[in-house]
């Protein structure tokens, strides 16, 4: 396994360097290329296959390649060194389900029009199935002769009834139990053990106690990382990769790992990399979304440590998959695309969780990396606004397959050849009833009714801390006018109305939280 990068090492004490070496293992910094050349059936530029990797809830500032000097992600960093890194990637639709609709269709999903809540997907606008299966990247790939395979533990996409038709549209789809299902009885986790993973404020909250018990029982009790969701997702992905490599058909393998999404339950070795050795409180495996004030300063620091630990643990199992990828010699004709769907607030601006009115980089920016087998643009950085709806046309372009006109995203693969996609001087997206607009100079946040506007001057305030909208109303008005000119009137959904609708739908269908679909 890859050791820590030199930048990360500079920021760590000798004790933590020794811990990191024990956790990550000692191996070559990068796997060396196997001999061989692209198959005659490869697409443009020698690309025959694509591996698409989606990691949930990864913040760029917790990734070494994006400048983190504290968090160890050597395998993501290795991919970044071999590929093109996008430093301004903002999903146009947040969070989990809207982002994947954007990825799989190549279309803009925000704003979320005509939304009706479904029993198995929830009340958040945009959480809807993919109804037109003829307009997905999967259909285009299959029509072009590619084998399509997905491995995931993502609860709504991998297990909900609403997404069953989409799952069946793939040649092979493997859903990994863990976040959904019962691998081991939750009763095998004691109350004392579960309290180790909860903030004190949540010790008597049945929702969080029961959820954490289930998570611990399903994922190795925080002691056996081989039973973690990431280990089993990437382990099954290795199995699928073996089968695909033996076949004659070009393929697109998608790996959608829900880790490092909370609940977090990394093993102690990883927590020790980031946690205060003198801390004697609970490890924080989950937080209640909202105001961070209920967490003590020590608990909030521990939550950040557990998130970092989970990110590093996930990176390690990505590394196991990549080891097999190189052993099979697939780097000679297979492109890799890696990205996340959203971030997570860990105390920034006084919030924890996924908060729609805080669409700042901690919440709304993601890592996005494209690796070409010929080493094109290796180690380079693009500041083009990249987004989730660009994934499908980019994957198709890498394979030399023409993207259909109904795809609205851009082909980012042209940057690998020194060209540029059409200019995107501003970018927009949103979550629930909130939007963001980004330019080189400004960030505008607000609600879909046109109120609650906040404006940030990136030249003077790159961390987006000071709202300068009152002193720059004309700038905010112009950005909002530009947004409405592009999207039309934005829909706004009443939360109480959505709750009534979903309650009625769940009663109608006799819905219960599914364990397996």
Image (tube, helix red, strand yellow):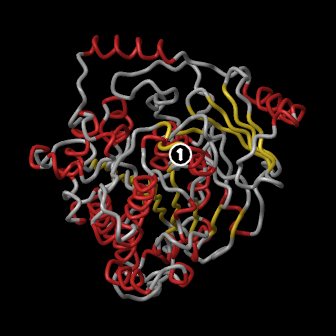
Instruction: Pinpoint residue 474: horizontal percent, then vertical percent.
Output: 90, 32
Instruction: Pinpoint residue 271: horizontal percent, then vertical percent.
Output: 35, 66
Residue at 15% x, 45% y is 191
Residue 371, image quadrant: bottom right
Q: Quadrant of the C terminus?
A: top left
Mark 1: few/some/many CA within 10 Å (<14, 14-19, 20+): many
Q: Is residue 343 left or right of residue 187?
A: right
Q: Is residue 417 left or right of residue 338?
A: right
Instruction: Pinpoint residue 54: horizontal percent, then vertical percent.
Output: 46, 54
Mark 1 lies on a secondary structure that is helix
The reply to whether residue 245 is visible in this rendering is yes
Q: Note whether 268 is above or below 146 in the view shown.
A: below
Q: Note whether 31 is above or below 325 in the view shown.
A: below
Residue at 24% x, 53% y is 196
Q: Nearer the viewer, residue 163 or 452?
A: 452
Instruction: Name the residue carrying label 1.
Output: 103
The reply to whether residue 254 is visible in this rendering is no
Q: Note whether 367 is above or below 456 in the view shown.
A: below
Q: Nearer the viewer, residue 426 or 420?
A: 426
Q: Note whether 1 is above or below 127 in the view shown.
A: below
Residue at 70% x, 39% y is 428
Q: Quadrant of the N terminus?
A: bottom left
Instruction: Pinpoint residue 95: horizontal percent, then vertical percent.
Output: 51, 40
Question: Number of marks in the image?
Answer: 1
Q: Nearer the viewer, residue 371 or 303?
A: 303
């Amino acid at each position: 396994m890859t050791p820590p990068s030199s930048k990360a090492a500079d920021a760590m004490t000798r004790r933590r360097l020794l811990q990191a070496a024990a956790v990550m293992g000692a191996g070559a910094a990068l796997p060396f290329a196997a001999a061989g050349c692209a198959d005659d059936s490869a697409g443009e530029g020698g690309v025959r296959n694509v591996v698409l990797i989606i990691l949930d809830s990864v913040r760029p500032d917790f990734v070494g390649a994006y400048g983190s000097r504290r968090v160890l992600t050597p395998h993501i960093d290795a991919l970044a060194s071999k590929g093109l890194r996008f430093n301004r990637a903002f999903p146009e639709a947040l969070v989990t389900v809207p982002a994947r609709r954007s990825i799989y269709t190549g279309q803009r999903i925000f704003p979320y029009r005509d939304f009706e809540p479904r029993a198995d997907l929830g009340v958040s606008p945009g959480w809807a199935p993919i109804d037109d299966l003829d307009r997905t990247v999967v259909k285009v790939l299959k029509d072009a002769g590619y084998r399509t395979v997905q491995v995931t533990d993502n609860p709504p996409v991998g297990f909900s009834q609403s997404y069953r038709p989409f799952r069946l549209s793939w040649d092979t789809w493997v859903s990994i139990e863990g976040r959904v299902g019962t691998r081991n009885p939750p009763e095998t986790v004691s109350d004392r053990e579960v309290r180790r993973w909860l903030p004190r404020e949540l010790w008597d909250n049945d929702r969080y106690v029961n959820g954490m018990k289930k998570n611990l029982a399903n994922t190795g009790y925080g002691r056996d990382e081989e039973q973690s969701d990431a280990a089993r997702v990437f382990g099954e992905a290795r199995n699928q990769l073996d089968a695909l490599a033996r076949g004659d058909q070009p393929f697109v393998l998608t790996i959608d790992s829900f880790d490092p999404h909370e609940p977090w339950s990394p093993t102690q070795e990883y927590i020790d990399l980031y946690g205060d050795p003198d801390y004697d409180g609970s490890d924080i495996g989950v937080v209640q979304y909202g105001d961070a004030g209920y967490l003590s300063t020590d608990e909030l620091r521990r939550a950040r440590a557990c998130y970092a630990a989970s990110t590093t643990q996930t990176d390690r199992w990505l590394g196991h998959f990549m080891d097999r990828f190189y052993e099979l010699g697939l780097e000679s004709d297979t492109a890799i695309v890696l990205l996340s769907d959203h971030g997570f607030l860990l105390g920034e601006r006084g919030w924890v969780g996924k908060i729609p009115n805080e669409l700042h980089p901690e919440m709304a920016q993601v890592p996005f990396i494209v690796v070409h087998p010929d080493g094109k643009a290796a180690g380079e950085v693009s500041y083009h606004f990249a987004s989730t709806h660009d994934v499908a046309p980019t994957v198709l372009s890498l394979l030399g397959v023409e993207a259909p006109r109904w795809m609205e995203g851009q082909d980012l693969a042209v940057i690998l050849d020194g060209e540029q996609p059409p200019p995107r001087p501003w970018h927009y997206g949103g979550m629930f009833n909130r939007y963001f607009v980004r330019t080189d100079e400004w960030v505008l946040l607000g609600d879909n009714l046109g109120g609650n506007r906040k404006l940030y001057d990136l030249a003077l305030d790159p961390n987006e801390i000071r709202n300068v909208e009152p002193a720059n109303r004309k700038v905010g008005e112009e950005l909002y006018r530009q947004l409405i000119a592009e999207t039309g009137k934005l829909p706004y959904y009443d939360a109480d109305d959505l709750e009534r609708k979903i309650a009625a739908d769940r009663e109608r269908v006799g819905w219960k939280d599914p364990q397996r679909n």
